[in-house]
Image: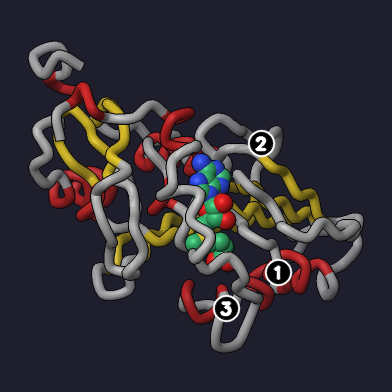
Amino acid sequence: MPKSSLLSTSELERSSVVANNTMNRERGLAGVNSYARELGFDPLSRLAARPHAPSWLDLCSGEGHALREAASTLPDDAALTGIDLVGPLVRLPAPPTLTEVVASVSTWAPTRTYDLITCVHGLHYVGDQLGLLARAASWLAPDGLLAAHFDPESIRWADGSAAGRATVSALRSAGFRYSARHHRLTLEGGREVTLPFHYLGADPAAGPNYTGQPAVGSHYADARFSTIAGA
Ligand SMILES: C[S@@+](CC[C@H](N)C(=O)[O-])C[C@H]1O[C@@H](n2cnc3c(N)ncnc32)[C@H](O)[C@@H]1O
């Protein structure tokens, strides 16, 4: 896609690929349609094992079912936060340990760190995915865990060619692990992360990804040569 056709973050967030009402926003904590199944671990067990007040930040939290289920079990000093562009379609009073924020993960930032940060099939709809991953790494507690679904195919250079291999290599160098089989990125331990990519814009017409749903293409210039690339 020509660079001039790429969408800005605000344009992307108004596009039909993000406002797709057939996406699965209703995963619970455990069971068939769940965070435990998609993440390959049970978030509640991990949080319950923490020696102090457990904290969980869920990016692109959808209806927030998993957070609500966790809130009903975790102690009163737990801190659970869900961020979603749309938020729950049916607004119910939140339990005291849960904060539901309707905002874009591209602009929102927390004022604390978290033991667990998840993004379950949310990055597919975010323009600057790598910028979000780098920021989220800094929101993680020193012994915290970040887990997110990620499709390297969605990362493109300015001319539309595949940047996935370079991206996974840079993420691994920064300390992330990537499971291609499960399309899962994980990072253990909060840190400052700088990835050598300069965000150019989003392609909302990239087509379906491995989930079968239409997803966003995220275009970058190599930050080491960004003046040459015209970024
Ligand atoms: C496929 S759903 C997954 C929801 C939830 N994680 C789940 O598994 O049930 C993707 C979610 O990402 C949200 N989303 C898309 N772009 C976003 C953005 N820029 N900021 C915050 N949320 C976003 C959508 O509103 C949607 O709820």
Disc 2 to disc 1, C-alpha distance: 21 Å
Q: Is residue 43 above or below residue 107?
A: below
Query: Under tag 1, what secondary structure?
Result: helix
* Residue at mark 3 to residue at mark 1: CA–CA distance: 9 Å
Image quadrant, ligand 1: bottom right
Q: Which mark is residue 110?
A: 2
Q: Residue at x 43, y 55 (%)?
A: 187
Q: Does the closest atom of ligand 1 sit within 8 Å of the Cβ of label 1? A: yes
Mark 3 C-beta closer than 8 Å to ligand 1: no
The mark found on residue 65 in the picture is: 1
Do the numbered discs 3 and 1 sit on residues whose CB atoms are within 8 Å? no
Q: Amino acid at mark 2?
A: Pro
Tell me the element at label 2: loop
- Identify which amino acid the numbered label 1 is placed on: His
Q: Residue at x 77, y 67 (%)?
A: 68
* Residue at the image position 62 percent from the left and 59 percent from the top: 62
Pointers 3 and 2 in contact (C-beta within 8 Å): no
Sequence-wise, which precedes: disc 2 or disc 1?
1
The three-letter amino acid code for the residue at tag 3 is Ser
For label 2, being within 8 Å of ligand 1 is answered: no
Q: Quadrant of residue 204?
A: top left
- In the figure, is residue 46 to the left or right of 152? right
- CB under 8 Å between discs 2 and 1: no
Q: Which label number is shown at residue 34?
A: 3
Residue 64 locus on image (x, y percent): 69, 62
In whole angstroms, how far apart are the C-alphas of marks 3 and 2?
Answer: 25 Å
Locate the C terminus and report the quarter of the image it occupies: top left
Image x and y of residue 23, in percent: 49, 64
The numbered mark, 3 or 2, whose residue comes first in the sequence reads: 3
What percent of the width, then of the height, locates residue 123?
42, 51
